[in-house]
Image (cartoon, rainbow, N blue to C red):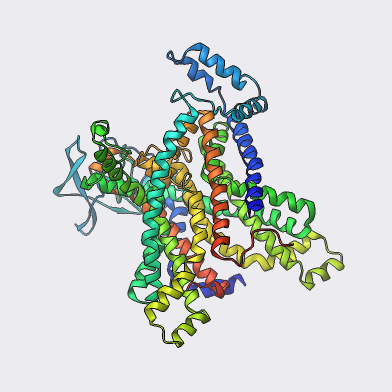
Amino acid sequence: MIWNLFKEVMRRPLGLISGGILLLLYVAAVLANFLAPYTTNEQDLDRTYHPPTKIVWGEGGLRVQAYDLVDPSMAKYAPIEGESYALDFFGKGPAYRFLWLFETERHLFTVSDPEGAVYLLGSDSTGRDVFSRLLYGARVSLFIGLLGITITTVLGFLVGGLSGYFGGRSDFLAMRFVEFMMAMPGLYLLLALRSALAPHFASDQMFFVIVVILSLIGWAGTARVLRGMTLSIRQNQYVMAAESMGQSPLVILRRHILPNLVSYLLVAATLSIPGYVLGEAALSFLGLGIQEPSSSWGLMLSQAQDVKVFYLNFWWLLTPGFAIFVTVIAYNVLGDVLRDIVDPKMKTR
Amino acid sequence: MISFIFRRLLTLIPLLLGITALVFILMSLAPGDFLTPVKAQRDVPAELIESIQRDFGLDQPWYVQYFKWLGNLAQGNLGHSWAYKLPVADLIGQRVLATFLLSLVALTFSWCIAIPLGVLAAVYKDSIFDRISAGLAYAALSIPEFFLALLLVFFAAQTGWFPMGGATSIDYEYMSFGGQLADRAYHLILPGLALGIGSIASIMRIMRANFLDTIRAEFVTTARAKGVKEFVVMFKHVLRNAINPLVSAFGFAFSSLLSGALMVEIVLQYPGLGQLMYQSILREDQFVVLASVMLGCTMLVLGNLLADILLAWSDPRIRLEKKK
């Protein structure tokens, strides 16, 4: 069934485009240490706020334009006429494990000349390559959505499915709790939870803390809808038949009720992943999420929040925002396409 | 109706109790005593600290503190802000007004633009205008609010047409009353825009869908068959019915009046409730956090209530009381 759905999505132009963009983003995130010429924290204090370097053709290959710092106080760079560095494809750079399999030093492209540097998207306040940080940040920002939605869906299905199936007092209690969770202003809860939990965790564990916080806030809505759907599905005769044959509730939930919910879950999950991406971005932006030395799109944007950036037109520091925007819009389009396929009645005319 | 409102307001009490208790537990989990930095400040008299410590039982476990805080709340005492050295009630009062103003501007702006746009998109369905506005709405819904605010600050810095932040200019105190009003309005443009664009898109989409649903109703066919002019059909018959569901959306918009502006306020340095809440969480300014969380929740519940009441008022088929 999932395979049919996939084929159906690929047949629609919007589905193909949005799915393709997402695939590209995730592949780039997974291959970040191969695609990025630098590591997240390779600083170059002589090249702060460097503009994106031009790539030129010459001497039988692609070359990187050389720049000269004209005005250090304004971080103004000017290209040096006729001077450039060779761009090496599959050249040597910092060592890493390729796909967590084997150690290598090869990167897609590097500049081997120690004098030169390639900044596809410029450099930031401490001369770190924005393009590399964007790729490493994608790992955090993109996978937080997948992980978060998995936790939310499992939790929502367990609570919603069980309380819808059994009903009675436990159902009543669970639903009052769900309503309580839904009545709370999400962002406030996020801030309060984060300030309480943060001191107990190291900065590299922060990723998981944020996922857990975001999922704890998000599961209630899913649970409520799933409870309603379970309630109506369990009226079906096949459920009664399974019950009278003495199948255990968990088996019935898994074998007879879950398959009916899959399409709804898929659509809901696709449409709510942007919430996680945005949640992480907002938290990191406020300085409450991912911390240095890690990188994430929200964190990069918060570092772009500087008067210097605004006045001197360092537009390349805002690219993480466009990355977030593209991710969110791709998920929204894909979710709409999925919904149109699963439930044609809901189609927006 | 009255019993319905009464019952809904009653559910507010356990909700607020639960949330404030949760905040208390969370705050007590955070390490360190928030009195330590206060004691280190020379300008806070020792008697004041002692009296607050006694009144709120700050040296006792969180549940004792919680009940003391509730007792103080019942007497109308919201506590004292350490960071601002002001009673919480005064501090929140100033900020609520600023946020309320901002949200109201954003709300009016977005509704005034979104409804005509939605109607136009529905009337000229599948035209170029419809396609473009649908695409723009999609983009507007997907852009993070704080990124939009950042872009606006960037725009303001590059062009110099708008102030980059704050609610008033430096020389605000010396302006005439009219000048002060104009200055406030001038500072509201960018945050209002950042806050309003997302809701323009969503309201426009709802309006368009409603309008298209209503066009297919039988009374529209009847009106057309009677020879009523197309213009009159659209604006007298369709529009009136299509706008009904939006009435309840207005209630929900009201509920987010105080809590929706947090990110925009922080980026544009607008001194509102959201910014206050964020800073007081960072500074562990406990009583300010509690009071603003309570205010936010109350607004949320009141807004939902308003949405239900408005819906019942606009559509008599909906009964709020339980079925007999």
Residue at the image point whose x is 33% and y is 74% from the top: B128
Residue at the image point whose x is 78% and y is 57% from the top: A166
Q: Front-most of B216 and A57? A: B216
Residue A54 in the image: state x and y as whole percent: 23, 53
Residue at the image point whose x is 64% and y is 62% from the top: B319
Q: Quadrant of the C terminus of chain B?
A: bottom right
Residue A86 in the image: state x and y as whole percent: 24, 51
Q: Quarter of the image holding residue A241?
A: bottom right
Residue A104 in the image: state x and y as whole percent: 44, 48
In the rendered image of this protein, does residue B231 appear above or below residue B89? below
In the rendered image of this protein, does residue B300 appear above or below residue B37? below
Q: Front-most of B91 and A184? A: B91
Q: Front-most of B86 and B38? A: B86
**Is any atom of residue A313 visible in this view?**
no
Residue A172 in the image: state x and y as whole percent: 74, 52
Q: Front-most of A133 and A330? A: A330
Q: Quadrant of the N terminus of chain B?
A: bottom right
- Left or right side of A320 for A189: right
Picture mark count: 0
In the rendered image of this protein, does residue B69 appear above or below residue B177? above
Residue at the image point whose x is 55% and y is 19% from the top: B52
Residue at the far left: name it.
A81
In the rendered image of this protein, does residue B122 appear above or below residue B137? below
**Is any atom of residue B35 visible in this view?**
yes
